[in-house]
Image (tube, grey):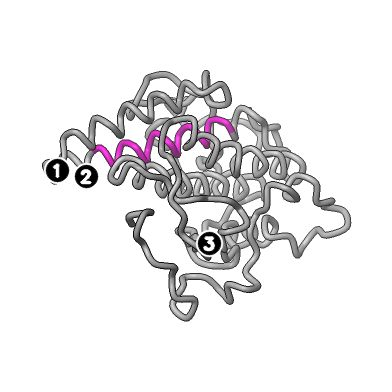
Amino acid sequence: MDPRTAPVTDPRTAPVTDPTTAPVIDPATASTTDPATDPDGHPLAVRVRRVADGIGAPEARVAASVAHQALAARLWSAALGCAVLYGRLPDLDARLIRWDPAGSAPDDLWLTEVRARPADPDAVADAVLHGHLEPLATALRARYRLAPGLLRGNAASALAAAARLLESRARDSGRTAAGHHARELAARLLAHPHLHGAGTGTGTGFRRRSCCLYYRVPGGGLCGDCCFTRVPGSSPRAVSE
C-alpha cells in the first residue's frame, strides 16, 4: 500500500466489524481503564480470550503475551513495509485505526483515513512504539502481570521478524536496496531506548533475552529467537521473566 495514494478502504469490505463501532486501543485510555469496573468488555480482555480459545492457552497471561506480539507484528509490518518500499509512513494515530478484537488471527487493522507521514526512524518509533506499544504494554501489565522485559522482548522480536521477512522478499524480487533499507531501519529501531537490551544482534538477526511464554501452550515449543535452548520446567504460576 502506497500511503501517498492509497484510497480509504471501503467500509463494506473492510476486514473488521462495523467500523463505526469496532473497538480500538486508544493510547489516551488504554492504560487507565480500570479492570475492576470493566473486566470483560474491554477490547484487550476480548482479544485475550479469543487468542486463549484459539491456541488452548493454559492461563490468560500466556494468551495476553501471544496477543501482544501478534498486534506488534501487524503494526511493525505496516510501518516498515511502507517506509522501506515507499519512503512514507501511513498515519497510525489510534483514532484512525479500527480493530476487531474478536476477529480471527492475524489481527486485521483498518484505517478510516490514509494520510502520509515522514518515514525516518524517529517517526516510525513515534508511531508504533509511543503511539501503540507503550500504552498497550501498560494495560497488559496491569491486567495480566506480564513483566516489562517480556513485553519489550515481544516488541523487539516482532520488529526483527517483520524486517527479516521484508528483507527476504525484497531480495527475492531483486530489490536489493530495499532489503538493505529494511535491515538498516530495523537496526536503528532496535537501538531505541525502549527496545535496547531486549536482545542480541542487530538488523534482522536477533535473539531475544526474554521468553514470550509460547512454550506453555500445548505443543507450542520454543520460538526461533527464544532465550531458552530447551523448554524450561518452571511452574505455570511463576511470574514471567
Q: Does the magenta portion include 76?
A: no
**Dot placed on the residue nearer the N-terminal end, 1 or 3:** 3
Instruction: Specify the label residue 54 is tagged with.
Output: 3
Give above or below for 139 relative to 192.
Answer: below
Q: Which residues are magenta?
A: 152-167
Q: Who is closer to the viewer here, 149 or 127? A: 127
Q: Is residue 179 left or right of residue 34?
A: left
Residue count near mark 1 (Cα–Cα under 10 Å), binned few <14, some 14–19, many ≥20: few
Amino acid type at mark 2: Arg
As measured in the structure, the alpha-carbon distance from the residue carrying label 1 to the one carrying label 3 is 33 Å
- Horizontal and vertical percent position of residue 169: 21, 44
Give above or below for 16 relative to 85.
Answer: below
Q: Is residue 241 left or right of residue 159?
A: right
- Element on which disc 2 rests: helix
- Element on which disc 3 rests: helix
Per the image, the residue denoted by label 2 is 169
Q: Residue at x 34, y 46 (%)?
A: 81
Residue count near mark 2 (Cα–Cα under 10 Å), binned few <14, some 14–19, many ≥20: some
Q: Residue at x 37, y 34 (%)?
A: 224
- Horizontal and vertical percent position of residue 61: 66, 45
Q: Who is closer to the viewer here, 4 or 215? A: 4
Q: Residue at x 35, y 47 (%)?
A: 82
Give above or below for 91 relative to 135.
Answer: below
Q: Are marks 1 and 2 in contact (CB under 8 Å)?
A: yes
What is the tally of numbered marks visible in this picture? Answer: 3
- Horizontal and vertical percent position of residue 43: 68, 60
Q: Residue at x 46, y 70 (%)?
A: 15
Per the image, the residue denoted by label 1 is 172
Q: Main secondary structure of the magenta part?
A: helix
